[in-house]
Image: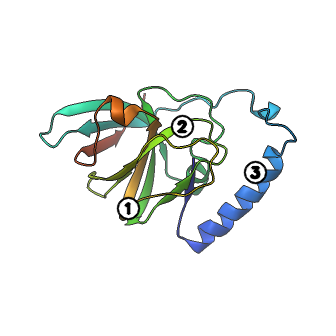
Amino acid sequence: MQYRHGNIITRGRFLILIAAMSFVGCSKSDEPNPALAADIEFRADGVLDFFHPDSSLVARIAIEIAESGADQATGLMYRRSLPDRGGMLFIDQTPSMRSFWMKNTALSLDIIFLEENGDIVNIVKNTTPYSEAFILSTEPAQYVVEVRAGFTDRYHISEEDHVTWERRSF
């Protein structure tokens, strides 16, 4: 999953990264790049909890945190797996309109856009792998959570719910 940021300097770095990645990823067939034969291992940096409006815990997942520009630009790209109770949390310093795409992402995802206080702005379910179509927040969001497609339906997570998270050493 690729993250697009509004900062002009970050966009420049983003374009350089995309150009470099397009050379690495070019292939005359639909076969996976042999250089990417090994899956990227999930790194648990913390936990994230989903709560219903009555404060009942819905689900807890381990999260990999994407805070740096490089981590956010790469996101879950090139991954072949993600734990069922795992996800990636994208952290930004300020709320703004968020935009993602699925280029080089083999996994279908549910993407959850969050306000600064952890309230869910909107959920985009069952994204299309490898798509270059933009996936947008409907309002400004400061955080974004990506989980395996179907997670939000399986746990009945909706835009009425709330999220909290914390860093942890495992």
Residue to which mark 3 is pinned: 21
> Does residue 163 show up?
yes
Determine whether 158 is above or below 84 in the image. Answer: below
Instruction: Answer left or right for 12 relative to 122.
Output: right
> Residue 128, image x and y in percent?
56, 43
Residue to which mark 2 is pinned: 108
Determine whether 100 is above or below 127 in the image. Answer: below
Q: Earlier in the sequence, mark 2 or mark 3?
A: 3
Residue type of the residue flagged with mark 2: Ser
- Distance from disc 2 to disc 1, alpha carbons, whole Å, reads 20 Å
Residue to which mark 1 is pinned: 138
Instruction: Answer left or right for 112 relative to 157.
Output: right
Residue lying at 46% horizontally and 32% vertically, measured from the top left: 44
Disc 1 is placed on an element classified as loop
- Distance from disc 2 to disc 3, alpha carbons, whole Å, reads 21 Å
Mark number displayed over residue 31? none
Residue lying at 49% horizontally and 52% vertically, measured from the top left: 67
Q: Earlier in the sequence, mark 2 or mark 1?
A: 2
> Residue 73, image x and y in percent?
60, 53
